Image (spheres, grey):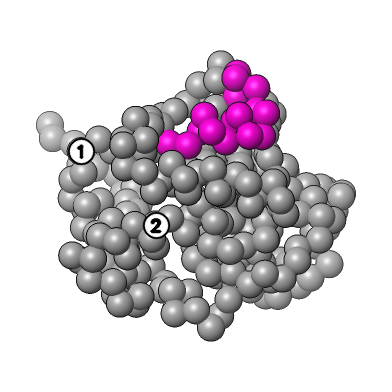
Amino acid sequence: MDRTAVSRWNGETLREAVGWAIATRRSVRAFLPKHVPREVIESILMVASCSASGMNMQPWRVHVVTGTVKDVLSAAIAEIDDDPARAAELCEPYDYYPREWSSPYLERRRKVGWDLYGLLGIAKQDKARMHAQHGRNYRFFDAPVGLFFTVDRKLQEGSLLDYGMFLQSVMVAARGHQLHTCPQAAFLKFHRQIAEILDIPSDQMLVCGMSLGYADDASIENTLVTEREPVSAFTTFHDKEKETKV
């Protein structure tokens, strides 16, 4: 891949292609069993490896699970997840979400949750169906490919910023192959089990998991499109000099 190559596409086509890939990236929660060739996975990861990182540290490590290995891992996690006592003993390697939710994040969290459950017809009091739906995370929502991302424990917060860019690049590059993804923090509390099954060294910390495959467009949950705030809501343009008092 020539990273200095001039684009073969004109400006408008290029803008549309890049914009389409970013804007159509969303968390898909139902996949088809259609096979994803290894060369396609490698192509996606190769493109994503061009992501920016401080001092070109490239802190990412990727573990790809398919076939029997994926099934064994999913079964091991589901066994613990279905046992409240064992699940309560688990802890996450780092705090992904805030310890105390506040506005506007609390409202956004609730909305996406109830929008999804509403589509699936799951009532607020139906704890069993909520648990079953959440448990589909651990089957990668039936995607044929599961990805786990780890980082060297010696690295600091800056490397997690770099990692976010890498994860976004994986998901956007997947769109170029008509594939979809679902990034999953749900795997974090099972980091010890995942490390044991995949023989991940102890100096590596789990960042997140991800499902990869072809979306099942017939599944109602895949009609969920989360809302985004307008640019004016999160951007301040500093284009005028402040008046100074004499």
Question: Which label sits on residue 83?
Answer: none
Question: Disc 2 residue type?
Answer: His
Residue shown at 41% from the left, 45% from the top: 81
Residue shown at 76% from the left, 63% from the top: 36
Vertical order, 4 against 25 (above or below): above
**Magenta span covers which residues?**
189-204
Residue 151 located within the stretch drawn in magenta: no
What element does badge 1 sit on? Answer: loop
- Mark 1 / mark 2, whichever is N-terminal: 1
Residue positioned most to the left: 246
Question: Which label sits on residue 100?
Answer: 1
The residue to which callout 2 is attached is: 134
Residue shown at 20% from the left, 38% from the top: 100
Q: Position of residue 180 (x, y in %)?
A: 61, 65
The mark lying in front, picked from 1 and 2, is 2
Identify the image quadrant of residue 217: bottom right
Q: Position of residue 19 (x, y in %)?
A: 59, 68
Residue positioned most to the top: 154
Q: CA distance from mark 1 to mark 2?
A: 21 Å
Question: Disc 1 residue type?
Answer: Glu
Q: Is residue 126 visible in this depiction of the protein? A: yes
Name the residue nearer the viewer: 42 or 24. Answer: 42
Vertical order, 52 against 233 (above or below): above
Name the residue nearer the viewer: 178 or 1. Answer: 178
| Disc 1: CA contacts within 10 A as few (<14), some (14-19) or many (>=20) | few
